[in-house]
Each structure stands twice: as C-alpha cells, then as structure tokens.
Image (cartoon, helix red, strand yellow):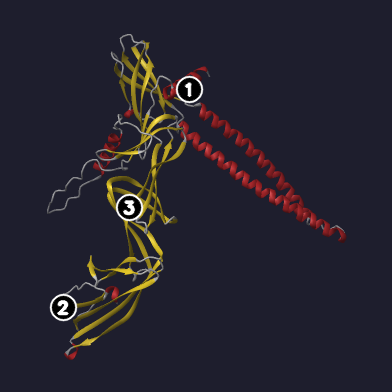
Amino acid sequence: MLKKILFLVLLSVLWCGSGAAAGRVVFYPSGADFSQNLRSSIQTGENGEYVMFTLSGQASPETFSVSPLSKGVSVNDVSWTRSDLSQSPAVVEIAKKIDQLKFKLNSVRSEKQALEGGILFWTERGKVQEAKAVELDKIAGLVVSNLSSLYLKSAKIDVKITEIQDLIKDLQRKQREMSGPNKMVWNVKVSVSAKGAKSAEFKLSYMLNNCGWTPHYKLDAYPEQGEVKFSFDAEIRQGSGVDFKDCNIALATVRKFSRISPPILNKWRIEPKVEDEAPRVAMDMANYALEASVVPRKLKVQSVPRQVSMATYSLWEMGRKTIPAGSTKKYTVVTENWKSDFTFLARPSLSPDVFVLADVKLDNAKDYPLGSSILFMEGAMIGKNNFIFSGNKKEMYFGSDPMLKVQRKTLEKLSGDRGLFGSTQTYNWKYLIEIENARKSEVKVKVQEAAPDAGDKSIKLVVKSSPKAKMEDNNFEWVVSVPATAKSSIEYSIELKAPDDMKLDLGIGR
C-alpha cells in the first residue's frame, strides 16, 4: 500500500509539482503532443547515475525524447517498463461513486420488486367473486385506486433506474478514459552523466494516445446585411489518464491521412501495367505519424486563440487551460462576421425553391479542417452539413428562401413536318418562368436551365429568349431583378429542325 501511495505521489509531482514548468499540449485530430521542462533528482545505482520519470500509460514510447537543460549533464540511454499502479486519486474517487450508485440501483430495484408484488396482489383481488353485491363497487374502487397508484410509482421507478444506469455508464466511461484501457503507467529510466550533480532540469516530449479534437462550426446567413456570422468551436477529448493543469494548449489542423509525398507518375507503356499502391500508402501514413510528432514549441502563447500558419498546416494557440483527464470540453476558437455577396439561385424545371448562395471573399487565407456545421438563415436553423475551408474564397449554400418561389410553365410543345414531301421534322418548345418575391426589398435571382446541345451538324437549333439568355457551361442563365412583393417573368423558346429520316433522342425535352 505504501509503495502504491509513493508511486501516485511521483505521478502527481511529474504533472503538477513545483519543480515543473507549465506543460504544452498540441492536440491533433487523433492524438496529442505533450512537452514539459522538469527538474528531477539524480540517483545512483549499480550501473551509474540515472533519473526516473513516471508517464501516462497513453504515452507512445517511440515518440519520447528527453534533453538535458542543465550544464554538464548528458543523456546516455532510455529504458521503459510498465507498472499497474496507475490508479490515481481521481480514478479511485470515481470508483467509489460507481459503487455508491450500484448500491442505490439495487435498493431501487428492490423497491420495484415490492411494487410488483403489490400490483400482483390487487390484480388478483379484483378477480374475487365471493364478495357481496353491495361490496363489489367498494372493492372495485380500491382495486382501481391502488393499481393506479402502484403503476404510477412503478413508472417513476423505471425512469429512476434508467437514470442511475446512465450515470454509472458515464462514470465508467470517464474511469476508462482517465486510467487508460490498460490502467497502467510508464516508468522511464534515463541513464545520465551528471558529474556528481544532485538534480538537473530536463525537457520531455512525447505523443499521447486517446486524445484529440474535433471542429464544430456555426454559419448564420444574413443576405440583406451582406454577411455570414461564423463561429468555430473545438471539442477536445482528453483521455490521457492524467490532468493537464495550467498547460499551454494548441490545436493543429493536420488532415487525417494526408499525403506526405506527391503521387508517383506511372510510366506510359503500350502494354498496361497496374502499380500496386498499398505499400506506398502505408508508408505515407507512417510518415504522417512521424511528421505529426514534430511541433514547434517556442511560439509565444496568448490568452485569445490565434491562428499561426505553418508550412503545411495551421496551429491555433488557445492559451493556458486546465483540462482534467477523462473530460470532453468545448472551446470557442473564432467568431467573425464575413462580408459576403449573396445570390439567389433557381432551377425551376427541377424545383420551385430559390436557393441562397453566399460568395465569401476574405482578406486573409483561412484553414478550417473538415467538421460538422449547423446552418442558420437569419437566426433560424435550416440544417446541418459538413464544412471545410482552405483559402480566402468560398461558396456556401444556405438552403431555400421561403420568401421566394419560382415556377416554369410549358406554353407550347409541338412537333411536325416541313418542306417539300415532308423532308424536315420540327419540334417547338416554349416556356414561361415566373419568379415571385414576397420580401419587402428587391432581389436579384439567377435562373438556370439546361440548354439543348445538337449532337449532329444536320440538327439546327434556334433559341429566342426575353430577356436574353447568357450561356454558362451549356446552360441558359438569366439574372432577373424582382421588385419587392411582386413577380418577374422569363419567356424562352427553342425550335429544332432535323432531317425527316433521322431518329432523334430528345433527352429531357421528350
């Protein structure tokens, strides 16, 4: 027992002792890089001088590095051993709470069994037939009254049982995250040459598993104000098994499984040859893990989150924070108002809705990794989507505007023959598009429709449009101003001529 207490004291000293400088933690999408300056006593054993460090069981030995900061001290070698004495006081406290809840759960279940006995009694009492006629009403009333009360109490106890079970599951999850899956710590023995010094300062750094962060975004569009209100939150998962106390926290936006090296160009052979990509992809993933462990540590930390652009990713400095083991915390990283040009886009042959498109152009490039986003239109939630932004320009859709509607009507759809002896076949399409604006201000709506494309030189097409259509990517496109609480319209027609003996596929115009 004494050995266990001493071991826990060592673990506590490593992470929050007075001889240790505040640590630095850089969270990646999966994993965290921890570093700390630490003064440690130098001990002497059979094989010479050494120092001992106790690390979280989630530490990755292959990423561990130790550098002496005291003059005259050098590192010779490092050895690792496991210990099963990782039960920190916080974990022990959670275990006590779990035991208390389990005791309470058993008590509530006993109460439930008693109620079920009462329900059975009054259910059977209601079946008694020997009672006199004058007593039947009284018995029936007692049965109904008691059963109603018992069933109500039973339902409440069921809710209570579920709540206690959920609390137990949540505490068990926190217990696993705080102590790690194996409930162990690492004992790191560092052999040193210290020339008789009693203590020395060292810099430790290593990667931690069971940690990470996830981005969450909120985008609220205000077309009339010409802006998108943007917020970026970071949800940090801390399952290292130890508390991060007053640590400098940073978030790295490295993409998961991003390619480290460019793809290899295949040789151009007349006889096809398929290259096996699997070994190279595996190597790229290994390189990613290796590069992710190299993080700058001398950046000045500020209390307000700020973006630091690195060569291939961004680092968000979050300032000093305390993040207990086993916790999941959400922090606001950025809140901004983005000036945006808004366009209302309609494709009436496919939908009567008019969609809102925001074109964001920022002064400085942004680097926001892939995450979930909640979309709002003028404060009203419209849905969820994935969001990623790299650069200073981005187009974003914000669903349909309920104040705008569009409709396409077919005015004419004819076919026939022309020319001497019917040598030419003809087709005519005529459409009317109406855009209705219920807003109190004028809006400009971009309308797009598919334009026919002749697949043969002998097919002749004549298009008429009012207003005149612009061609964009083989589509008709109009930009129409629609006055407040009014309608605007577009008329266009297409005439097709082709040889009589040609079999035509009219596509979507059939």
- Lower position in the chain sequence, tag 1 or tag 2: 1
Let me know if residue 342 appears in the view.
Answer: yes
Res 480 quadrant in image: bottom left
Kindly indicate whether the residue at mark 2 contacts the one at mark 3 (C-beta within 8 angstroms).
Answer: no
Q: Earlier in the sequence, mark 3 or mark 1?
A: 1
Q: Residue at x 20, y 45 (%)?
A: 263
Q: Is residue 146 above or below residue 287?
A: below
Q: Nearer the viewer, residue 125 or 226?
A: 226
Q: Does the image show residue 505?
A: no
Picture coordinates of residue 379, whole percent (x, y): 44, 55
Instruction: Give the residue pinned by disc 2.
Output: 458
Along the horizontal axis of the image, is 314 left or right of 182?
left
Q: Quickly name the residue at label 3.
A: 339
Q: Secondary structure at mark 2?
A: loop
Secondary structure at badge 1 equals helix
Determine the CA span between mark 3 and mark 2.
50 Å
Q: Considering the image in quadrants, where does the C terminus appear?
A: bottom left
Q: Position of residue 40 (x, y in %)?
A: 38, 17
Which amino acid type corresponds to the residue marked 3 in the rendered image? Lys
Q: Which amino acid does the dot numbered 2 rest on?
A: Ser
At 34% from the left edge and 56% from the top edge, which residue is drawn? 226
Crowdedness near tag 1: few (<14), some (14–19) or many (≥20) residues, C-alpha within 10 Å: some
Q: Earlier in the sequence, mark 3 or mark 2?
A: 3
Query: Which quadrant of the structure image shows residue 351?
Result: bottom left
* Element marked by disc 3: strand
| Dot 1 amino acid type | Leu
Q: Residue at x 44, y 24 (%)?
A: 16
Using the numbered discs, state the Cα–Cα distance from disc 3 to disc 1 in whole angstroms.
Answer: 54 Å
Q: What label does residue 8 carry, if any?
A: 1
